[in-house]
Amino acid sequence: MVLTQVDSRLSRITENYFDYYFEELKYFLAPLFDYKQGNCHNVTHFASLILKSYGVHHNKIWIYAPTRYKEDSKLTIQLPDPNNISPNGILTWGYHVALFLHYAGEECVFDFFLDSKKPLSMAKWLETMQARKFHIDIENPDNYLFYTEPSETKKNGLFTGQYFKYDGLCREQNWLAKGLAINETAFNFYKNEYFHFKYKTLLSTDYKLFVGRVNNFECVLRDNTINKKMTEKFQQKHSSVISEYRLVYEENLKKWTERSQKFI
């Protein structure tokens, strides 16, 4: 879809402003948000770039669980995994980000990870995440990700309250397209290997470990390295399927690099 096609339908906005842009973004973003494990910041930033190209005023709304800003807390956002690919059946988020729009005295949240059918009120957004303790920031949409400081107990560090834009190292290293490619590749894996997620097979446990934690999937396909779970032994055992999906990831990376460059 090109922008001239969008412009030809602008008369619809006056009656259904939020719904119109929600459906536009859904068209551009599918199926990235169908993989729920991670990269919300990349999907949301891409969505933000699209809205910016339309001249639509918006912000990003960030929510942090205590584990991301308190040294002595392990409390995370936990939700049932609708795809049942997480090893324990639960999505575990330390933070989450979505789009926050306001128009004609009304406001809503666009969060395709939580609800891909309709915009949400902020109250419903918070209720859906079942977050009882949290920190929220409503920020400039140009802010891509947040800074962290070293922590004694958190391997990902603690949120400092500051953000950075998609510039410098992250842009040079193509973080945005890589995140989008990971999510599409993970969803490709889920669809193609659905039998092993629906039923208990000899591969179910390993496949859930592989794709059910975004850090593991990125470790193997994006970074081509190992970690405590994605060991050399694990990767040798599944070398055939890993080689297959590395190729899928590379194709998806080319696609999302081309698509994102149109808006950056």
Image (cartoon, rainbow, N blue to C red):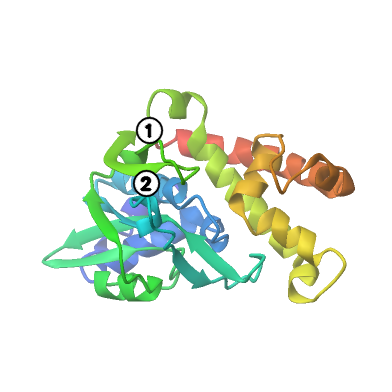
Mark 1 sits on what residue?
A: 166
Q: Nearer the viewer, residue 147 or 68?
A: 68
Q: Provide residue 115's location: percent of width, then percent of height.
A: 43, 71
Q: Nearer the viewer, residue 229 or 166?
A: 229
Image quarter hosting the C terminus? top left
Q: Residue at coordinates 79% horizontally, 76% vertically from top-left?
A: 199
Q: Is residue 199 above or below residue 138?
A: below
In this orientation, does residue 99 appear? yes
Q: Nearer the viewer, residue 173 or 91?
A: 91
Judge left or right: residue 234 versus residue 38: right
Mark 2 sits on what residue?
A: 50
Disc 2: CA contacts within 10 A as few (<14), some (14-19) or many (>=20): many
Q: Is residue 192 above or below residue 221?
A: below
Q: Residue at coordinates 62% horizontally, 38% vertically from top-left?
A: 253
Please, what secondary structure does the residue beneath circle 2 have?
A: helix
Judge left or right: residue 33 versus residue 235: left
Q: What is the total number of numbered labels drawn onto the structure image?
A: 2
Judge left or right: residue 234 versus residue 163: right
Q: Which residue type does callout 2 highlight?
A: Ile
